[in-house]
Image (cartoon, rainbow, N blue to C red):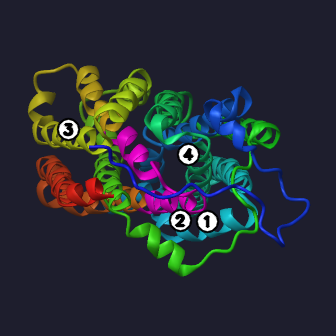
Amino acid sequence: MSGNISAPESVSVPPSGARADATPIAAPEDAGRFLGGPASAAALALTMFVEAVGYGVVAPTLPFLARDAGAGEAQIGFLVGLYAAVGLLVGIPFGALANRYGRRTLVLVGLGCLTLASFGFVLAPTYAWLVAARFVQGLGATAIWVGSLTIAADLSPDSHMGRSLSWITGSWSLGFVVGPALGGLGSVRFPFILYSLLSLAAFVVGCMALPETGRPGARTTLAGVVRVLRYPAVLASAAATIALSFYYGALEAFLPLFVDGLKVERIGIGLLFAVAGLPSILLPGAIGKLADRIGDARVIFGGLIYAALVSALFLALAKVLPLWLLFVLMGLVEVVVYVPAVALLNRGMPRDERVFATASHSYAFSGGFFLGPLIGGLLMPIGGYPLLFATLAAANLAAIVCLLASRRRIDAH
């Protein structure tokens, strides 16, 4: 099963009326080089790394900042999930902005937002200020995901899409390992000072090395957006992404408190989340090659089954396994679902439509990551952790049903 979308590749030529001073578009021959060459590959990897550090640094910090500000479990869940909820508002509009002003510009705006948000976390005196900073962080993350993944897909041939994008997801995973470890350093606000410097450095590198692969000035139409959202591969990728982000959103909100109840220090919590990211550093290349060989959807199917099992057995395993090993098993879910889901989304997608496919991915991720903490916060007072993990298992099983329902349509395309 290939998981491909049969569609012609459009030529990246500036349309009439495009701005004469627009950033030069990456030359077609760049597609034959890995992610356009060493400089652009490094800039893309750094951008995704920095976004992931910001994603991961909040695990050992944000729930405790919110609790210190007087927030309850529902408010903590809302704060963690807000990062993704922003993507539900701006994913498609950001896709339109990327078409109008360029993918590169969108990425740079995203890095600027991350820098601003990190200063907000340092200075926030109340829960309301934390909400504002988290909102800006969500804007930055969405801009980076839409812009960076689209650039990477533009520079990746379909036959090697899984392997090429595994470089991007692997860079993100490395950042997710570093982020929680960074979040355990010093006071609960100190990590955000370091992160502001890191995101600012990434902005400078992006200005120098990020390529423009789109057609700045291209017109966006509602029909074009809707057409992309009807591709069966896009819908299947979205179902897997929602389940995955639902899973991780709930865990990021409440697993730190679970481990804290086991008398683990905050720096230890950060290290546990760092350990959880190791599989996604070591294995994305292998998973990408497997997806290229046997088909994206088959790898996703196996990953969702594994995620459901881990969720259903988590509390039982917590009684017999060391915490570090349990976190490794938990972290394996990301690489076996996410790498093939991103590849499935982009194979065969026309260049001018990729930005909206990526925006749909941002919506899927945002929806799951918002609902996971929110629903988790509502369920915790009712059934505690047993009900939470049962819900996570059910979410992955529901995604399996959606994937199976889309299988024939994916094959037909």
Q: Amino acid at mark 2?
A: Gly
Magenta range is 337-363
Point out residue 18 in the picture as x, y percentages from the top left corner: 82, 68
Using the image as rendered, state which of residue 321 and residue 13 is in the foreground.
Answer: 13
Q: Point out residue 281 in the picture as x, y percentages from the top left corner.
A: 44, 24
As drawn, the label of residue 94 is 1
Residue that numbered label 2 is attached to: 91
Secondary element type, mark 2: helix
Which type of secondary structure does the marked residue at label 1 adopt? helix
Q: Quadrant of the C terminus?
A: bottom left
**How far separated are the C-alphas under marks 2 and 4?**
17 Å
Q: Nearer the viewer, mark 3 or mark 1?
A: 3
Q: Amino acid at mark 1?
A: Phe
The circle on residue 153 is 4
C-alpha separation, residue under disc 3 versus residue under disc 1:
32 Å
Q: Earlier in the sequence, mark 2 or mark 4?
A: 2
Are the residues flagged by discs 3 and 2 in contact, CB closer than 8 Å? Answer: no
Q: Which residue is mark 3?
A: 302
Pinpoint residue 365: horizontal percent, then vertical percent.
41, 55
Chief secondary structure of the magenta portion: helix
Q: Does the magenta portion include 277?
A: no
Q: From the viewer's perspective, is the residue at label 2 or at label 4 nearer?
A: 4
Between the C-alphas of marks 4 and 3, the distance is 24 Å
Tell me which residue sits at (50%, 43%) in the image: 55
Q: Earlier in the sequence, mark 4 or mark 3?
A: 4
All told, the count of numbered labels is 4
